[in-house]
Image (cartoon, rainbow, N blue to C red):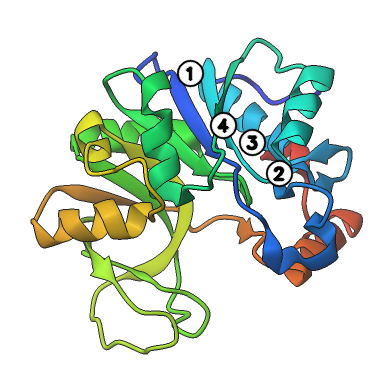
Amino acid sequence: MFHKITKHNSGYIDTAMILAAGFGTRMGELTRNLPKPLLSLGKYTLLDILLNQLKSAGITRVIINLHYLGKQIRRHIGQHGTDGLEIIFSEEPRILGTGGGIARAEQFFPPRDVLVINSDILCDISLDSFIEFHRNRKSLATMAVWPSRDFQNYSLVKYSADKKLRGFTHKGIPEDYPGPMGIYMGFQVLSFDARRYLKEEFSSVIETFYRNAVAANKAVSVFEHPGYYTDFGTKSQYMQTLEELKEGRLDIETL
């Protein structure tokens, strides 16, 4: 499928989770009968690309949570295979959000750090570098952030020059924060202790874990990724990415 050279994180993290249960309502008719992770990007789906990125980083076991049109994701994995990855599905009869979804999948995690990624992100982040950064910092958790000061469209991450999480802004409300800021990319490493903040109920990992950890002055780190990044929050963002592919400005094989 892909021809990317496989890398390894020395087995430090071997388990990842893809958050794939969402409705994708902002995508309109594109996701009316298709889950967002199965949107096509050239000859691949977004899910295919994410699974390859995880495998290239030495991940061997992937948990995928399912709710909206989950049978299609199961069918896609069954038909296309996973090229050596062990795939485990975490069914959510009632959708649980990012926090609750991770908590429900805890039964499948080892009692150590795991990588968790959103299923609607396309970027060229080096997962090996991200994982190694987290390992060296010995943090409770680490989130990946794309530097930005776009107050209008995002709730931004505030952090210090030495990459410590300091808090979050509110979408649409400018804030005079002197330090660096950015958009949470949907990539995070969560320790076992970090996941203990989460409960199997509808919740956001930002609200349930990160805000509480900052309030308690816990060591949470921020990994800056200034490279290519897009999230498929809307139909227009997806169509723009298709245009980049068509014009040769984006090469899926290199992600």
In three-dimensional space, the C-alpha distance between marks 1 and 2, rounded to whole angstroms, equals 25 Å
Q: Do the residues bearing badges 1 and 4 touch, measured as CB atoms within 8 Å? A: no
Q: Are marks 1 and 2 in contact (CB under 8 Å)?
A: no
Answer left or right for 93 relative to 10: right
Q: Which callout, 2 or 3, points to the residue nearer the camera? A: 2
Look at the picture and state if 147 lies above or below 23: below
Residue type of the residue flagged with mark 3: Leu
Real-space CA distance between mark 2 and mark 4, rounded to the nearest whole angstrom: 16 Å
Mark carried by residue 50:
3
**Position of the N terminus by quadrant:** top right
Q: Earlier in the sequence, mark 2 or mark 4?
A: 2
Mark 1 closeness class: few <14, some 14–19, many ≥20 residues within 10 Å: some
Residue 115: assigned label: none
Q: Which residue is mark 2?
A: 37
The residue indicated by pointer 4 is 91
Q: Mark 1 and mark 3 in contact (Cβ < 8 Å)?
A: no
Q: Quadrant of residue 26?
A: bottom right
Instruction: Please name the amino acid that badge 4 sits on.
Output: Glu
Say which of 214 and 148 sits in front: 214
Within 10 Å of disc 4 (Cα), the crowding (few <14, some 14-19, many 20+) is some
